[in-house]
Image (spheres, rainbow, N blue to C red):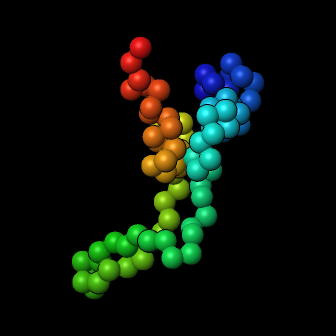
């Protein structure tokens, strides 16, 4: 990956040190967050039994740099604001 070649560091570390930490995106991670107590969980429909079944957690790490970030609305606002400002 280009980022790893240029920085000489793993993608997650470069992302954290060059973007996430300096921009104070405190709720943004590249790692898979642990489920929080009381958080919603996914289900899927089983057509044979006609019942909803718990769904396994999907690992966003499969997307790698194409979409494995986890964030929240507050951090997305921090990230987006500079792009919307006009000078």
* Image quadrant where residue 40 sits: bottom left
* Image quadrant where residue 43 sits: bottom left
Direction front: furthest residue: 87
Q: Quadrant of the C terminus?
A: top left
> In this image, 34 relative to 46: left or right?
right
Report whether residue 79 is seen: yes
> In this image, 12 relative to 37: left or right?
right
Tell me residue 31's x, y (percent).
62, 50
| Residue 87 vertical position relative to residue 19 in the rendered view, above or below | above
| Residue 72 vertical position relative to residue 45 in the rendered view, above or below | above
Tell me residue 64's x, y (percent).
55, 41
Direction top: furthest residue: 87
Report whether residue 11 is seen: no
Direction right: furthest residue: 8
Tell me residue 74's x, y (percent).
49, 47
x 24%, y 77%: residue: 47
């Amino acid at each position: 990956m280009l980022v790893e070649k240029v920085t000489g560091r793993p993608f997650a570390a470069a992302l954290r040190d060059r973007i996430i930490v300096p921009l104070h995106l405190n709720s943004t991670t590249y790692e898979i967050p642990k489920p929080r107590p009381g958080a919603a969980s996914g289900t899927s429909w089983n057509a044979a039994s006609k019942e909803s079944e718990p769904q396994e957690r999907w690992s966003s790490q499969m997307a790698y740099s194409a979409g494995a970030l986890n964030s929240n609305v507050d951090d997305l606002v921090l990230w987006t604001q500079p792009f919307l400002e006009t000078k």
